[in-house]
Image (tube, rainbow, N blue to C red):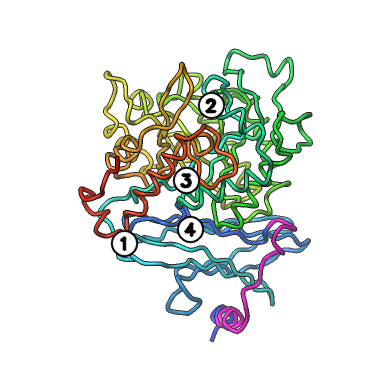
Amino acid sequence: MNAYKLAIRVIIFLVVISTFAFATPPGTAKPEISLTLIPPSPVTDQVTLDVRAGIWNNTTAKKTIYVLFYLDKVAKGNLLHQQTLILAAKSNGCVKFPWSTRNMAGKHKIILVTKSGKKVLCKERPMQVLASNIRSTRRVDGAWLGFYHWSEAEGKFWNPELKKATDEQWGEMMTAQHALEMNIIVIQDVVRNPTEYAGKHNIEKDGYKGVPYYPSNLFPGHVPIAAVDPLEAVLAAADKNGMNVFIGVGSYAWFDFTNGSLEWHKKVADELWEKYGHHDSFYGWYVSEEQDGGLGDAQARKDIVHFFKEFKAYVNKIAPDKPVMLATNSHNVGSAIDTYRKLLPNLDILCPFGFHRMPSTDFTGEQSANKLQELCNEAGSHLWMDMEVFDFADGNALVPRPINGLLSDLHRFPNFEKIICYQFTGLLNSPTSSIKPGGPNTVKLYLDYKQYLDSITTPLQNLKGGTNIPIHK
């Protein structure tokens, strides 16, 4: 028996006879290993899972690390992938592979095992696979979160209540979101700078004036809200509930992907990883600046391609398995096909919005979704949907969208791996929550969606074809 096969047998033996070892005690340090599934559970059996492991060598010597992935249990017949990493001192690396969910309906877990010398580390993630003939689960898989809405007009009905929310109440809201199985959280931004736009500011000359929502060493002050560190509160609640959090690195200036913005994002990402990288729920990076589906003018297109090439490479050195996500709108996509082909290889997840309100001279929503899926397939990136759960009232104020609008989007667009709504805070509230930002209609939408979710009792029957899924009034 060669040394490599012997090493694998030793790994299996050590894992089987002992409880799983944690890379580091929870809440004390960043992990030595990390396991990320893109997309996270649940998925249908029409999805190819992007399985990634981040591996850190925090020692002062070079290390050889055996990396193995298993399905459901650590056994020879359950091995999905194996690879050997040789990491220099104080470095990290990523091991990744695709796993097709075809014919794999059921509840599973993906298990990561690493061995270096006598040290064995393990990490696992659940993965429920739903039998289907479409990519989408036709569920809302997660939601955006804003600690305070950037527009006072749009946030008119919920900003006053969010301003008073305590750290404990932020945790409570995340538990209410978890109760709807919306287990992906996208934090809109971590620094408030709502009035600056690309090409219309003098940040490089006058300095950055944004104010943080978290205790920051980079920026003075604190947004005037009651919560001391709502980011920590959200991550702690997400850890407890098994949720996945994209931290919004922003905002520098709307639609700004210049070099000044790039350097700012790098510094903020460094601080966020240093402060919050120990959280198991830290799933990935969301770049908050957004952009039109046409990706701007010629210079803006050059800027955004360069930005994500550099930013992804930078954060991969910090946390090699964590994906990077951008939200654009779904309009004018046809004018920027060549730019998407340059952008998407350096963007893990594209999450566009506005498919139900396409301009009359543009693609239909379905055509835009299909074109973006084609481009993501070419690049090996992921296409998720940012589904709007708001309407406008009383001027520009955002109010809950009626449930039929949500269900229409869920049924119209079958190709999205994940559907995330904008947003939970201020538009959805559990009837048991101690605060209800946005008022009674937010509770109605919460209960209407829960009724729909509860009606999906047999995923195979309900997902295939979809015509028998009830739409509740």
Q: Residue at x 50, y 51 (%)?
A: 183
Q: Earlier in the sequence, mark 2 or mark 3?
A: 3
Q: Are marks 1 and 4 in contact (CB under 8 Å)?
A: no
What residue is pinned by disc 1?
Answer: 102
**What distance separates the C-alpha of mark 2 from that of mark 3?**
22 Å
What amino acid is labelled 2 in the image?
Phe
Tell me which amino acid carries mark 1.
Answer: Arg
Magenta part of the chain: 9-30
The answer to whether residue 384 is above or below residue 135 is: above
> Is 378 within the magenta?
no
Mark 2 burial class by Cα count in 10 Å: few <14, some 14-19, many 20+? some
Task: Report, in whole angstroms, how far the alpha carbon at label 2 lies from the one at label 1.
Answer: 45 Å
How far apart marks 3 and 1 lie (CA) works out to 24 Å
How far separated are the C-alphas under marks 4 and 3? 20 Å
Q: Secondary structure at mark 1?
A: loop
Per the rendering, the mark at residue 157 is 2
CA neighbours of label 3 inside 10 A, class few (<14), some (14 to 19), many (20+): many
Amino acid tagged 4 = Val
Looking at the rendered structure, which numbered label has been put on residue 142?
Answer: 3
Q: Marks 4/2: CA distance?
A: 41 Å
Q: For the residue labelled by badge 2, is the local secondary structure a helix, a strand or a loop?
A: loop
**Residue position marked by numbered label 4 in the rendering:** 51
